[in-house]
Each structure stands twice: as structure tokens, then as C-alpha cells.
Amino acid sequence: MPVRLDPIEAPPSLDLLGPLGPEIAPLFTRPFLVLHRASELYTARICLLLLFDLGWETRLRSGVTLDDLCEGLAPQARKPLAWMLPFLATADLLVAEEGRYVLRGLPDLDLADIRAAVDIEAPGHATNFDLLDGVRSHIQPFFTEGKDGDALLFDLALFPLWLAYFRNGNLGYFPNNLLTLLALREGLPPGARVLELGGGAGSFAQLVAQQGTEEGWLGRIAEYRFTDVAPTFLRRAQRNLAAAAPSLPLAFQALDLNRPLAAQGIAPASLDAIVGINVLHVAQDLEATLRDLRGHLKPGGRLVIGECLKPSLDTPLYLEFFFNFIKAFTSVKLDPRWRPRHGFLTPEAWDEALGHAGFTGIQHVPPPRPLMDRHPSFTVGAITAMP
Ligand SMILES: C[S@@+](CC[C@H](N)C(=O)[O-])C[C@H]1O[C@@H](n2cnc3c(N)ncnc32)[C@H](O)[C@@H]1O
């Protein structure tokens, strides 16, 4: 039986969405809002089921602290668990009592009923749930044997599910790309040289080609340099992107944002736009990376980033479930002033980080407040900044 996901929040009114509101409002369809709610609920149930798989149900029933749970586990287990326990408390699956987390009663952990509801209201998104199931079934050795999270999450069985996730057809992911595209499009000069960081499955480049052609601005791009640190993604893009993103003037190269761009063949002050969707938060030293990127933008050029955004630094986002197993996501240099946490940040924390690295003219698409305060499903945005 499909689970009742209602009440589903109402879409935001246009006045909350800023000057590009008419192009952003269509994102907030009922299927999008249902998928968001369902993904949150599914992730919470998967999280608790994973703790049961690990054999901890009895301990959770008597109540545990984070320290109790981490005892005897590989040290890398701490960060995901430090996220999972409060997340489960916000999802009402555990009760938080003075630093202890307690499981009470018999929570509903049915997954099929969530899938059934999404099948009716947002068909075609089962792979998002397959990915969560896949993480649950593959990740146990991360806790029990200290195995590397990246290797477990990106093995051959799960890789196709990631590719299916990072698609413009995925209502849950598409807003990342659309908002960044709107931000990039504004102020793109003729003859623009654009570099994409962490281009991954190539869905953003495809959207640029498609929408740029339809709207008649693609000709303003003289070079679109698609880069990624991962050879698998890069090779795949080289094979497929020319056909999937016709008329985009593509160049390809391997590029690691944790190494100086000059050492990787990018000339200083040579780019009109550097764009990155959900990648900058993995910068090991965000300050150093932002300063380096700034030095490679022409005067008047722009850094354009799409990021998952948190309403507050302490609010767990369901998407963090996956990423907390990835070393690049969790092992970053922190500074309480401009890099307060690992992973996703608030819009204000991004402003601090960008301003500290010397960027000016920082703008958000859409303006994140009060939108994020009133609409909990809004957890993504684009930010542009000038050198
Ligand atoms: C969340 S995915 C972004 C997906 C991409 N925008 C898409 O639509 O497919 C992050 C991407 O960043 C890449 N990445 C991770 N660490 C990186 C680094 N140090 N330098 C450059 N790219 C990196 C990953 O290989 C992955 O393709």
C-alpha cells in the first residue's frame, strides 16, 4: 500500500524566487515536492535499517551515545554516525535524550510503500531508491572492517546507479543544473572560455548545449573545457558528450581542484567562467582552491557554483547520507570563520568563504532567504562571484 506522504508543502510564491523566478518556479511541481519528501523518508528508514543490519537494534533500544556506538569500530565510522543519529532523531525514528539516542516502539520501516507512492506521483525515479538500497547493502564493511567508502560506493554494481542519479531527467537532481545554468547564462560574454570542474556524468554540459541552442546563446561560448579528476568520468564524457551535447565547442582534460590549476596547464586570468556543480565542497583546502580559481578568471569573469545548501549548519540533509562515507567530503581543512564544517554549507557560509578568498559581487540564484526558511525542500542554489 502506498505510504501517505501528505501534507506536501505548497510551492513557493514567485516573490520569493527573485528576478529569475518565472524560470525557477516550474521546478516546484507536485512530483518534485513528493519525490523530495519521499527521498527524505526513504533515507531515514534505510539509515535505521542499516543500523539494524549492523546488529545494533538491542543497543539502540537501551539507548546509546555516539561514543558508545563508535567503540570498537574503525575511526572513520564516527563522522557518518555523528550525522545519522541526529538525522534519525529529526525523522522521529530515534528519540534524543541528553546525548543518548533511544529506539522506542516499532517504527514503520516499510520501503515498498514509499516506492509505491512515488510510482504513482513521480514515476521513473525508482533508481534513486535503488541507489539508497545499494549503499545500504554495500557499506557495512566501512563500519566493520574499516574499508574505504569510495571503493564500496563506486564499485561496478553501484556506478550505473550514480549515472542514473546525475541526470537532468531526475527531478531530484535537475534543480542543481538548472539554477547553475541560469546563473552562468547571465552575463556570458561573446567568445567566452568556460571551464567546468568535476563535470562527472556530463549532465550540466548537456543542459548548456540544449538550452543554449534553444535560447540562442550557445554561440557566445568559444570553448567549453570539460574536466574531472576521475578518469572513468572523463573517458565516458569523451566518448559520449560530443553526441549528447552537439554544437558545444568541447575540450577535455583531467583536472584536480586540489592542485594548482597553473600546474595543470591553465593560464592565469584566462577564463570567463569557471563552473562547478556539487564539487567545490570537496576542496581539501577551500580557501586555497578558491584563491587559485580566482587567479584564473579574467577581470569581469565569474565563478559559478551549484551547491546543495543547508538551512543551518546543524540541519542534517538527507543527501549527506551518501556523501559522509566519502573521504573527500569529510576530510577537509576546517576554519571556524570560513570553513566551519565539512560537506554542504549554508548560503551565508559560502558568502564568507568566497569573500575571504577575495571574491566580490557575490550573487545567489535564487536569493536563498527567506526562501529556505519557509520551504524546507529548497536545499540547492547557484552562487556567482567575481575575482
Ligand atoms: C557530485 S559529482 C557532480 C556531478 C556532475 N556535475 C554531473 O552532473 O554529473 C562530483 C564530481 O566531482 C568530481 N570530483 C571529485 N573530486 C574532485 C577533485 N578533487 N577535482 C575535480 N573533480 C573532482 C567527481 O569525480 C564527480 O564527477
Image: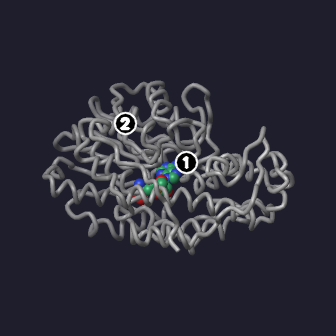
Badge 2 local density, few (<14 within 10 Å), some, or many (20+)? many
Q: Is mark 1 within 8 Å of ligand 1?
A: no
Can residue 199 be seen here?
no
- Tell me what residue is drawn at x 39 percent, y 63 percent: 170
Q: Amino acid at mark 1?
A: Leu
Relative depth, front residue between 189 and 254: 189
- In the picture of the structure, the residue carrying the numbered disc 1 is 317
- Tell me what residue is drawn at x 48 percent, y 62 percent: 231
Can residue 128 be seen here?
yes
Q: Select label 2 or label 1 by which is in front.
A: 1
Q: Position of residue 131 (x, y in %)?
A: 54, 67
Q: CA distance from mark 2 to mark 1?
A: 32 Å
- In the picture of the structure, the residue carrying the numbered disc 2 is 296
- Tell me what residue is drawn at x 42 percent, y 61 percent: 166
Evaluate if marks 2 and 1 touch, with contact meaning CB atoms under 8 Å apart.
no
Q: Position of residue 336 (x, y in %)?
A: 61, 27
Question: Which SS class for mark 1?
Answer: loop
- Residue 361 tag number: none
Q: Position of residue 373 (x, y in %)?
A: 45, 36
The quarter of the picture where residue 384 lies is: top left
Q: Is residue 110 left or right of residue 164?
A: right
Q: Amino acid at mark 2?
A: His
Q: Is residue 47 left or right of residue 378?
A: right
Q: Quadrant of the C terminus?
A: top left
Q: Position of residue 269 (x, y in %)?
A: 33, 34
Q: Is mark 2 within 8 Å of ligand 1?
A: no
Relative depth, front residue between 144 and 228: 144
Which residue extends farthest left? Answer: 216
Task: Please say if 145 is above or below 262.
Answer: below
Q: Of callouts 2 and 1, which one flags the residue occurring earlier in the amino acid sequence?
A: 2
Relative depth, front residue between 27 and 160: 27
